[in-house]
Amino acid sequence: MVSDPGTLSSQQRRVYEFVKDSFYRNGSMPTLREICHHMGWKAVGSAQDVIQALIEKHRLSRSPLKARGLQLVDGPSFRNIPILGSAPAGRALEAIEHHEGDAIVPDFIRGPVFAVRVIGDSMKNAGIEDGDLAIVSQTDSAENKDIIVALSYGETTIKRLVKKGRENWLYPENDAYKPRRIDDPSFRVLGKVIGLHRYWENF
């Protein structure tokens, strides 16, 4: 009996379900390294081989929108959102007015949304890496423990908002950096981070 060429092996199905779950949870595909970590593999090539098999079996396809990007064959449609600067570096006017290009996000991400490019590793323990595009829901308020994009002393920054009584603090997610109490009278929240846009590497 000849097996269906579109049938997934148990290993391929595990990777496919992880990719799909990551996409719907984060709004972006996991990296090859994240797939390896999930599967317990040491070599990136193992993830590359399975991803190629999923492409050949029409579960994934190469995105025409982004170089080296992948998308779910049965996934949602996409829309463009503006990239409005960088964080933590970047002047206020750059963050608000300077349009650096567009990012692609799934249509299910609704409302006024923009992206900022992450600079540095101060939020790496929250899974936000240098070079990522943070997807931000525009709002001027935030709850305790939200990860926010904020304007402080004329610069944009991405940090976790922590409320302690009457004091508000900006907390990094990296022990190499120190929390900072918010004492800037002109401080304001620009938005809340709701996802990441990350490009595939070495594929």
Image (cartoon, helix red, strand yellow):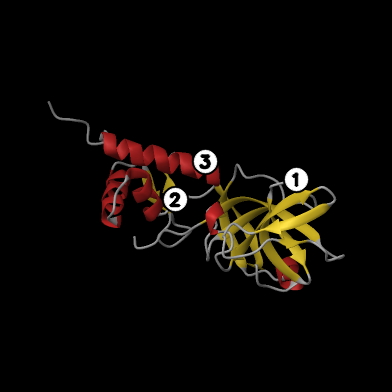
26 left or right of 15? right
Q: What residue type is labelled 2?
A: Pro
**Image quadrant in which the C terminus is located:** bottom left
Residue corresponding to mark 1: 143
Circle on res. 24: 3
Q: Which of 169 and 85 is in front in this view?
A: 169
The spot of residue 61 in percent (x, y) is 38, 49
Q: Earlier in the sequence, mark 1 or mark 3?
A: 3
Q: Earlier in the sequence, mark 1 or mark 2?
A: 2
Circle on res. 30: 2
Instruction: Name the residue at 35% across, 63% down.
Output: 202
89 left or right of 39? right
Q: What residue type is labelled 1?
A: Glu
Asked whether residue 8 appears in the rendered view, the answer is: no
Instruction: Name the residue at 57% across, 60% down.
Output: 175
Contact check, label 1 and label 2, Cβ < 8 Å: no
The spot of residue 147 in percent (x, y) is 66, 52
Circle on res. 99: none
Q: Which of marks 2 and 3 is nearer the N terminus?
A: 3
Residue at the limit of the structure toward the top, as seen here? 1
Q: Is residue 30 above or below residue 170?
A: above
Secondary structure under the numbered disc 2 in the rendered image: loop
Nearest to the eye among marks 1 and 3: give it: 1
Residue 196's image quarter? bottom right
Q: What residue type is labelled 3?
A: Tyr
Residue neighbourhood size for the residue with mark 2, other residues' Cα within 10 Å, grouped as few (<14), some (14–19), many (≥20): many
Q: Is residue 117 above or below residue 72?
A: below
Distance from Cα at disc 2 to Cα at disc 3: 11 Å
The spot of residue 62 in percent (x, y) is 39, 53
Residue at the limit of the structure toward the left, as seen here? 1
Residue 200's image quarter? bottom left
